[in-house]
Image (cartoon, rainbow, N blue to C red):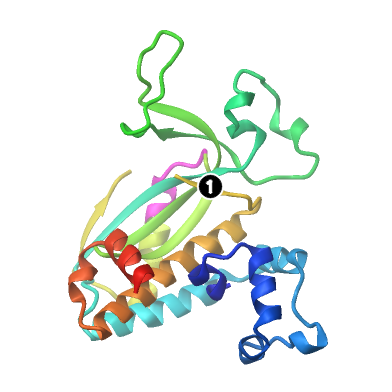
Amino acid sequence: MFVQKVKGFNTRELIYFLRTNPQFAQAIGFDPINNFVPSEVTFSVFKKKFDTSYLFEIIAQSIQKGIDEGIFDPNNLCIDSYPISFRSFFNNKKSHGKFMNQKVYYSHPIQANFGVKPVSNSKPVYDKNSNQKQSISYFGFKAHTLSFFNVPVFTLVSPASHHDKNYAFPLLHKTIDLLNLHGFNLLADMTNSTSLRFINAVEVECNLSNLYLIASAFLAHNMGRDDLLDSPKTLMYEIACL
């Protein structure tokens, strides 16, 4: 899954990559020579059932090493959330005005639901009276992320309607327990898209993205580019270009 995140592959591209790079595939435990590379369905089920506590442990160990090496500053923490729109009939502009109950539209249970997200000034949205909207509804999830000022650490995912305050303290307690932090300052503020239908699968994807940025910070530090550590966006862009 981490290879998929680093390479920017979708699942089908990942499977093709593993089947056409047998030495690499064998190095991470697959056997493409005997056609032992999981199918798209297997990968999907794995993400849905994957225990994210293992991923949290890997992130915690990586972050602790970064703190010890002076790459990360644990004195300032912030908690914020961002919307993750589900690729759905309900988020399609052509479907606006066509009201339908989600339980009727989806024949199988789905964990996404309706929430509200702010509208970017760079992509304004107007109502029928040509007034600019400050927020719009969307169908999907919400990612609640605790970060140091230069890198995301842990993410919990909820249905879009859930309030941020219900996840701030669980995130904080998880961070304190796994990293043994104390004496820090906390800043809390009480668009993305996914085809995943289950919270656990989305949470795995979000924390893999966090781990990718953490690994990128180590790479930048080892290359003598600590100037990239000030901004996650700059770090991600510059490392991708190396």
Nearer to us in this view, 57 or 42: 42
- Where disc 1 sits, the SS reads strand
Q: Quadrant of the N terminus?
A: bottom right
Residue holding disc 1: 193
Asked if residue 195 lies left or right of residue 215, the reply is: right
From this view, report whether residue 28 is shown above or below residue 217.
below
**Residue at 82% across / 88% down in the picture?**
34
Q: Is residue 165 magenta?
A: yes
Q: Position of residue 172 (x, y in %)?
A: 35, 62
Asked if residue 203 lies left or right of residue 59, the reply is: right
Nearer to us in this view, 227 or 242: 242
Nearer to us in this view, 115 or 4: 4
- The magenta span reads 161-168
From this view, report whether residue 181 is shown above or below residue 78.
below
**Residue at 62% across / 31% down in the picture?**
90
Q: Position of residue 9 (x, y in %)?
A: 57, 65
Question: How would you rate the neighbour count of disc 1 (Cα within 10 Å): few for under 14, some for 14-19, many for 20 or more?
Answer: few
Amino acid type for the residue under numbered disc 1: Ser
Q: Position of residue 202 (x, y in %)?
A: 57, 57
